[in-house]
Amino acid sequence: MPSGGTGTKMSNRVVCREASHAGSWYTASGPQLNAQLEGWLSQVQSTKRPARAIIAPHAGYTYCGSCAAHAYKQVDPSITRRIFILGPSHHVPLSRCALSSVDIYRTPLYDLRIDQKIYGELWKTGMFERMSLQTDEDEHSIEMHLPYTAKAMESHKDEFTIIPVLVGALSESKEQEFGKLFSKYLADPSNLFVVSSDFCHWGQRFRYSYYDESQGEIYRSIEHLDKMGMSIIEQLDPVSFSNYLKKYHNTICGRHPIGVLLNAITELQKNGMNMSFSFLNYAQSSQCRNWQDSSVSYAAGALTVH
């Protein structure tokens, strides 16, 4: 396999990131995983193809695999050549974004190759840090999208590269800067952006227990809160999304990757590009009915360019 020629590596040895969450967050068996993904995808309509960007969850597949299928079904492998995967950092404090230090991301289906040419362009901006292999393998927010990416692209598996980006706790102005930077890549129809995010994490273990009694049961209040945020994302307005997060503090873990995407879209809209985003599925890991309960919400959606 080709190794990166950005000059950032000391040798030509190909470095791989193992599928560190296989066997726990999803099955490590390629045939089993393939059948599972096929099953979920077969139950979904492709109404928003070709997607230019998708938002999909990153929990264990038993929780969110069927929800994520709604987003991945909108991917058109015949035109997609580069896939940018923007995932939030769960374990390390990061005020900017970080790039991987490896060449290959392994999955139980097949290996995915990082686009060292695009990495070189991003690296040159001076806006990125380098994540260690340890940080890379500890993090699940990008990895949970790799098997689905591999599955969605299998008919063209030797014809695409990935650009994984770990997104830190960005300020609004940083989200704008990164949005501007990524907007030129989002403008290209052969690129796909995968934005990794779960929605509300509710309950004592997440230290978040917002409840609007007028909505009825707790899980209905959570759904109402999430759908408020989702409809703001569909309006493609980064400022309203920031204001919503400040007001309700909804624990949307991919809020910064979503902020970057919304700012990239805003940049392209200024140049007259016409786009729309639709959420296609919403789910919760369980239905909270009392204060001891907890749940995580998932949403899947797609951005299309008109």
Image (cartoon, rainbow, N blue to C red):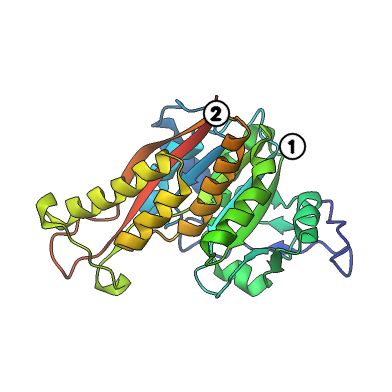
| Residue 33 visible in the shown view | yes
Q: Position of residue 26 (x, y in %)?
A: 47, 56
Q: Specify the label residue 274 is tagged with.
A: 2
Looking at the picture, does residue 274 appear above or below residue 72?
above
Q: Give 44 or 7, whichever is nearer the viewer.
A: 7
**Kind of residue at disc 2:** Asn
Kind of element beneath mark 1: loop
102 above or below 65? below
Q: Residue at x 24, y 56 (%)?
A: 286
Q: Give the image location of residue 57, x and y in percent.
A: 44, 51
Q: Circle 1 sits on which residue?
A: 159
The answer to which image quadrant residue 200 occupies is: bottom left
Residue 210 falls left or right of residue 276: left
Residue density around tag 2, few if under 14, some if 14–19, many if 20 or more, within 10 Å: few
Asked if residue 107 can be seen in this view, the reply is: no
Give the number of the mark in front: 2 or 1: 2
Q: Residue 235's x, y, as percent?
A: 41, 39
Measuring 57% from the left and 35% from the top, which residue is drawn there?
269
| x 49%, y 69%: residue | 90
Front in this rendered view, residue 153 or 272: 272
